[in-house]
Image (cartoon, helix red, strand yellow):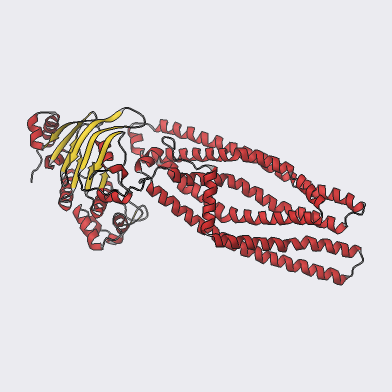
């Protein structure tokens, strides 16, 4: 996996995944093969019986013989119709079940991705894989897969029937297919890379659009509209060129194939005519072979169409299956359980992919049940430290442990129970208020949900909603403003009941009075828990047990509020500035 990009599966990995999916529903796949074989076998009788009719008429056979053979053609055609319909029914059910497995695996893998991996790759790529790519794979599994299987069986049976009539005619038919074979090899050598590049370009377009939409206010504030337009146009231009490349491949592939369909039939008629003229072969056999090869063009056309579709879907499948190669949140399945809730930060250093070190040798111990406030100017490394404490990122040097276990090595479930990070970024899920809360604790009762809402001061406005907890939220339901969405996020934290809560400007969207009330309510609910607050509002620091001051990636001061104010250092300067602008904080 390259930096900033989610991995793409190799062709061998895609084949293994396809085999695994087939084995998961092996009985249906076996039934699909059997039904297609039976349908193809029934279809072979028609041309052979037609050849018999020609020979019967030439030899002076009567109407009765022709009628019997014609009835046989009718019955075989009817059997082929019924068996083909049954095979398609089984194939579509197989495809839908397999698609469900692909979707479930994709969701499981996405949920297992570390947040840092998703952030570096961008949500646009992940969104494109989960929508367009999964949909393409689904269409292939539901439609292209069964159709390709049916057509392959039919083509093999038809070609085998020509060889059964006369090996020489079969060899001529196969030799006449060489142009198709050549252009197919030419196409396949180029198609996979072309479709992968097209998918990557589409992901880039989605990422740019998502980033522009989510940062619309920032774009307007800094007057970046023209720059974003140029960036979008460049991405669209790359996408257009890569799409035109795959289109150029198809514009060569399909015309050659269409013209080549004539060659097998023409070759058999010419060779068969010569053989018939020399008395080596009956006219009925020549007619039957020509009809077989004429019919052969239909499944062959379907196969080639589906092969072309498989190149696109194969690239999509490689992108979907590529998540299996991405780092997992618990890569080693670490069973270690923290001995306690003590957090130790030892000589921690951290540097992002682009740029110098953000943290430079930070040492800190957070005692269980302690309320610690981390303050400092913008860019001091406070948010980076919070991400390391929450296990979202792993330090590039040093260690961050909880109860003696590296935080970054904890599995998702253990980590969620141990440490939870709440930022000013929030999300309201489509669904009811209850649905939004049960994300944190699916087994919570209504009483527990109301208690969590009351803890963050959100029970009042929720009770005023038309259906209370059952009120639908989102564009088609009740809309929530930023402060209400943030309160829902904090209520989820209360329900999750972690041992350590990290608040990184978690109440920034609330007005000062509500924010202070919410923080104190949370402190009361989480009494006995460890609370680490990253804040600019110094009343949070005033209420904390200890205050840590960050400057230029270093921890420069650590102590109680009173001790740091008395020390006349950086914190005292911040306190005086805030105290003069905002007035003294309440201490009750």
Q: Position of residue 168 (x, y in %)?
A: 82, 50
Q: Choose between 563 and 518: the one closer to the eye.
A: 563
Q: Is residue 131 rendered to the left or right of residue 163? A: left
Residue 466 seen:
no
* Pick the front one: 128 or 583: 128
In the displayed structure image, the side of residue 118 where residue 199 appears, left or right = right
Hey, which residue is sitting farthest bottom in the picture?
Answer: 64
In the picture, measured across the screen, residue 501 lies left or right of residue 191, that is left
Q: How many marks?
A: 0
Classify 440 as above or below 209: below
Q: Is residue 317 visible?
A: yes
Measured from the top left, where is residue 210 in percent x and y? 41, 41
> Where is 340 relative to 400, above or below?
below
Q: 512 or 225: nearer the eye?
A: 512
What residue is drawn where x is 28% and y is 43%?
Answer: 407
Decide which of 457, 108 is in the foreground and name it: 108
Is 223 positioned to the left or the right of 63 in the image?
Answer: left
Residue for point 55% across, 46% down: 314
Quadrant in which the N terminus is drawn: top left
Residue drawn 68% across the image and 64% down it? 81
In the figure, 415 relative to 93: above or below?
above
Residue 147, position as x, y percentages in the image? 62, 55
Please state the horizontal and vertical placement of residue 203, each as a whole percent of the image: 47, 40
């Amino acid at each position: 996996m390259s930096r900033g990009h989610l991995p793409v599966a190799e062709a061998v990995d895609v084949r293994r995944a396809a085999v695994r999916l087939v084995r998961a529903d092996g009985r249906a796949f076996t039934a699909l093969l059997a039904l297609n074989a039976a349908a193809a076998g029934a279809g072979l009788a028609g041309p052979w019986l037609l050849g018999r009719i020609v020979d019967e008429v030439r030899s002076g056979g009567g109407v009765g013989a022709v009628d019997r053979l014609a009835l046989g053609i009718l019955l075989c055609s009817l059997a082929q119709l019924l068996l083909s319909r049954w095979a398609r029914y089984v194939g579509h059910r197989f495809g839908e079940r397999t698609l469900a497995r692909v979707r479930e695996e994709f969701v499981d893998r996405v949920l297992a991705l570390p947040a840092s991996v998703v952030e570096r790759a961008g949500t646009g790529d992940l969104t494109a894989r989960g929508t367009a790519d999964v949909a393409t794979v689904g269409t292939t599994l539901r439609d292209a897969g069964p159709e390709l299987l049916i057509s392959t069986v039919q083509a093999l049976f038809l070609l085998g029937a020509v060889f059964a009539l006369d090996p020489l005619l079969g060899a001529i038919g196969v030799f006449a297919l060489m142009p198709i074979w050549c252009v197919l090899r030419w196409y396949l050598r180029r198609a996979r890379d072309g479709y992968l590049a097209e998918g990557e370009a589409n992901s880039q377009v989605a990422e740019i659009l998502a980033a522009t939409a989510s940062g619309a206010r920032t774009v307007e504030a800094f007057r970046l509209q023209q720059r974003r337009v140029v960036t979008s146009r460049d991405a669209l231009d790359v996408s257009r060129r890569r799409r035109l490349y795959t289109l150029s491949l198809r514009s060569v592939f399909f015309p050659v194939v269409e013209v080549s369909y004539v060659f097998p039939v023409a070759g058999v008629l010419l060779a068969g005519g010569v053989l018939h003229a020399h008395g080596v072969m009956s006219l009925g056999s020549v007619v039957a072979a020509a009809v077989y090869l004429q019919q052969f063009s239909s499944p062959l056309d379907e196969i080639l169409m589906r092969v072309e579709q498989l190149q696109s879907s194969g690239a999509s499948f490689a992108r979907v299956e590529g998540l299996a190669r991405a780092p997992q949140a618990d890569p080693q399945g670490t069973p270690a359980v923290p001995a306690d809730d003590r957090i130790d930060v030892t000589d921690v250093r951290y540097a992002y992919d682009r740029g110098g070190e953000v943290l430079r040798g930070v040492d800190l111990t957070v005692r269980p049940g302690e309320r610690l406030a981390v303050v400092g100017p913008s860019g001091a490394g406070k948010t980076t430290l919070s991400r390391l404490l929450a296990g979202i990122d792993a330090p590039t040097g040093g260690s961050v442990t909880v109860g003696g276990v590296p935080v970054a090595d904890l599995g998702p479930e253990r980590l969620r129970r141990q440490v939870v990070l709440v930022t000013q970024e929030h999300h309201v899920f489509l669904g009811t208020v209850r649905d939004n809360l049960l994300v944190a604790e699916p087994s919570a009762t209504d009483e527990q949900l109301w208690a969590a809402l009351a803890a963050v001061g959100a029970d009042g406005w929720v009770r005023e909603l038309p259906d209370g907890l059952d009120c639908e939220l989102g564009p088609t339901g009740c809309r929530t403003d930023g402060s209400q969405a943030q309160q829902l996020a904090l209520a989820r934290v209360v329900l999750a009941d972690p041992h350590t809560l990290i608040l990184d400007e978690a109440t920034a969207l609330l007005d000062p009075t509500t924010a202070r009330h919410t923080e104190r309510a949370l402190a009361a609910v989480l009494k006995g828990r460890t609370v680490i607050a990253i804040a600019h509002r110094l009343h949070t620091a005033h209420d904390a047990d200890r205050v840590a001051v960050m400057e230029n990636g270093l921890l420069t001061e650590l102590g109680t509020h009173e001790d740091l104010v008395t020390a006349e250092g950086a914190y005292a300067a911040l306190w005086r500035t805030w105290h003069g602008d905002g007035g003294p904080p309440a201490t009750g």
